[in-house]
């Protein structure tokens, strides 16, 4: 696995969220070391308790990063880990930045200074859908890049 594969694995693992991941990076120096040299005691230092470590450990023993990466390639999706040159600077400034981003399309657009996120309800009305589509279209026409988590509802 490459260093990016370890970050991808952490992004999907149960028991370790963005805050814990940042602490593990500081403690171990890299996602790879944190993935390979993990013990309940070391994880406790990063604020990951026994229950969450058990969830993580079970995931780690069964997760096949290469298989998952194959699915991403087939869907033409790229994973941009925290620290990658395409990882947006604005996200790095968050208290708990995402472990990584899943990108479909031109990853260079993540570096655009005129980017805006679309976030909203999962149960969108037809009116809400129309307003969102019109607003997004106008924003794109004005030169802004629309970023979406592609969650259920208005984001997608």
Image (cartoon, helix red, strand yellow):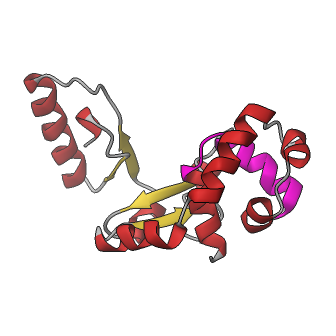
Q: In this view, does 137 lie above or below 100?
A: above
133 magenta-colored: no
Q: Is residue 114 above or below residue 16?
A: below
Q: Which of 129 and 51 is in front in this view?
A: 51
Is residue 55 at all visible to an observer of this figure? yes
Q: Which residue is drawn at 27% across and 27% down?
A: 122
Magenta region, main secondary structure: helix
Q: Nearer the viewer, residue 134 or 124?
A: 124
Q: Which residue is drawn at 29% across and 25% down?
A: 121
Rendering quarter of residue 97: top right
Q: In this view, does 53 lie above or below 105?
A: above
Assign the N terminus to one quadrant of the image: bottom right
Over which residues does the magenta segment extend? 12-29
- The picture places residue 27, in percent across and down from the top left corner, at 88, 54
Q: Which residue is drawn at 30% across and 73% down?
A: 74
Residue most extreme to the bottom: 2
């Amino acid at each position: 696995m490459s260093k990016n594969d370890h970050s991808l694995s952490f992004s999907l693992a149960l028991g370790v969220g963005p805050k814990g991941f940042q602490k593990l990076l500081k403690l171990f120096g890299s996602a790879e070391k944190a993935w390979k040299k993990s013990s309940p005691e070391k994880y406790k230092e990063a604020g990951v308790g026994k229950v969450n470590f058990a969830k993580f450990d079970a995931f780690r023993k069964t997760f096949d990063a290469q298989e998952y990466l194959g699915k991403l390639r087939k869907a033409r999706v790229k994973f941009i880990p925290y620290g990658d040159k395409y990882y947006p600077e604005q996200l790095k400034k968050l208290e708990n930045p995402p472990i990584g981003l899943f990108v479909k399309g031109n990853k260079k657009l993540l570096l655009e200074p005129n980017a805006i996120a679309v976030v909203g309800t999962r149960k969108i009305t037809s009116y809400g859908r129309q307003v969102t589509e019109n607003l997004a279209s106008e924003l794109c026409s004005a030169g802004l890049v629309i970023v979406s988590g592609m969650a259920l509802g208005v984001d997608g």
